[in-house]
Amino acid sequence: MKISSRSILAITLFASACTTTRQTSQGGAVKQNYVEQNLLNDSILQYAQVGVAIFDPSGNKYLYSYKADKYFTPASNTKLFSCYAAMKYLGDSITGINYFENDTAIFLYPTGDPTLLHPDYHNQPVIRFLQQSKKNIYINPPKWNTTAWGEGWSWDDYADDYMVERSSLPVYGNVVQWVQENNDTTGSSNPDFVPSPSIYSNPEVNWKVRFTADTSRRFRVGRDLNTNTFFITQGLERKASQFVPFVTNGLQSALELLPDTVGKEITETPAATRRKLERTDALQLLAMQSVSSQPLDSMLKPMMHRSDNFFAEQCLQMVSYDMFREFNEKKVIDSLLKKDLKDLPQSPAWADGSGLSRMNLFSPEDFVALLQKMEKEFGMPRMKNILATGGTGTLKNYYRSDSNYIFAKTGTLRGVVALSGYLITEKGKILIFSVLVNNHNGSSTAIRRKVEAFLNEVRRSN
């Protein structure tokens, strides 16, 4: 067969290109093989989807990469994006309430602050401000352009304390704590013994309560789907308690619970007055004042350490209010992705603030890019303070030996294990990493131990 010189040239160029591609692939394959040998060689991950990205900022290169550009459900790693939004836009302190006042009244504008009357915060500047005022107090209904639950949430978890409703004016963390105290358990071994415990709530509420029987004889509280009707099963425990989300009904539940604490009536602004205020909105904005509630990081730290879904959701609502004077997480997410986060390696599907939604889709490279951005914009000392390290928060049972070398956020849903953060090597180098596991059918604890061993090996090797 006769081959022309043009064909020979084309074959030569093609071979050269193949060689270059093969060398690039070979470099990637070495990294991939390391991940396979040190992380994926376990039966618990045999059928799972795994993505790994470990980046060296000092060398501006990935040291290890395995399906790092693929999309995964990240569970609570989503909170890293909500945390970024809050750090970027909410300043050093949370705005507890905005208000406008005239000679006779104060008109409150809710900001979505989740710390109002939250049991973790004993200092309550907003409550103190309202108690000290001698004027009538009204609340202006906000532009609430979203829903109490996030897109893609599992609706039948509505009575569980990890799926608290979002709202413009949260109070008490939008949960009620039911407590049982039982002083007489002497007949508990008798199957016919009927306890007569004291049962009360924090805060004290006047909502409907129905008592139910249960053969387990353990204290338990449920709730009606759409109303604040609670179903309580008395137990034999000497003391037991349970936190249950309440139905916020917009501002209604907050308006029911606030007067007892503030010591005066608080009502919605009458419609006629509201229309008048809306017509003079520009003048209001000039005269608008605010009351700060808590230092921002005093909320972000527990949010990340205990993976607080409610705080994370309210972060996006507060940023939305700050940006648009309305509550709409979709609008703020769209704005962030188009502006502040437009350079992410892959364009994520971002559905909520907490990661409860399985509609969230991010890549390991997205988390690495975000964490690098956060370190540059906010500094490593602040990131170390906000994120959990070994032996603390959701990492309390992991990375305990020679702690303070990892600062990260966990993520867990059924079939999902995630961990993204910063890793300080034995040589003092700071690496940024993300390990996302989807569709596993094994033990989450066993997978976390496997990831822990893998990252500790990376730490020793670099």
Image (cartoon, grey):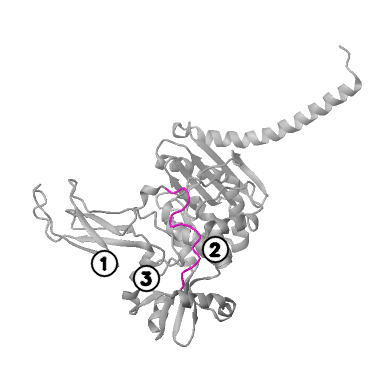
Magenta residues: mostly which secondary structure? Answer: loop
Q: CA distance from mark 3 to mark 2?
A: 23 Å
Contact, CB < 8 Å: mark 1 with mark 3? Answer: no
- Tell me where residue 330 appears, x and y as whole percent: 55, 55
Name the side, left or right, on which 445 lies relative to 381.
left
Give the camera-side residue of 190 and 144: 144
Give the camera-side residue of 152 and 43: 152
The amino acid sitting under disc 3 is: Leu
Task: Choose the circle earlier in sequence order: 1 or 3.
Answer: 1
Query: Which mark is in front, 2 or 1?
Result: 1
Query: Which mark is in front, 3 or 2?
Result: 3
Q: CA distance from mark 1 to mark 3?
A: 13 Å
* Residue behind mark 3: 255
**Secondary structure beneath label 1:** loop
Task: Choose the circle earlier in sequence order: 3 or 2.
Answer: 3
Relative height, residue 411 to residue 381 (above, below): above
**Secondary structure beneath label 3:** helix
The amino acid sitting under disc 2 is: Ser
**Is residue 143 one of those drawn in magenta?**
yes
* Residue behind mark 2: 320
Give the camera-side residue of 339 and 270: 270
Name the side, left or right, on which 212 lies relative to 124.
left
* Residue behind mark 1: 206
- Please report the residue visible at 78 percent of the width from the left and 31 percent of the height from the top: 17
Q: CA distance from mark 2 to mark 1?
A: 33 Å
Can you see residue 385? no
Residues drawn in magenta: 140-153
Farthest residue toward the front? 272
**Secondary structure beneath label 2:** helix
- Tell me where residue 320 appears, x and y as whole percent: 54, 63
Give the class, few, some or many, for how many residues have Cα within 10 Å of label 1's Cα (few <14, many ≥20).
few
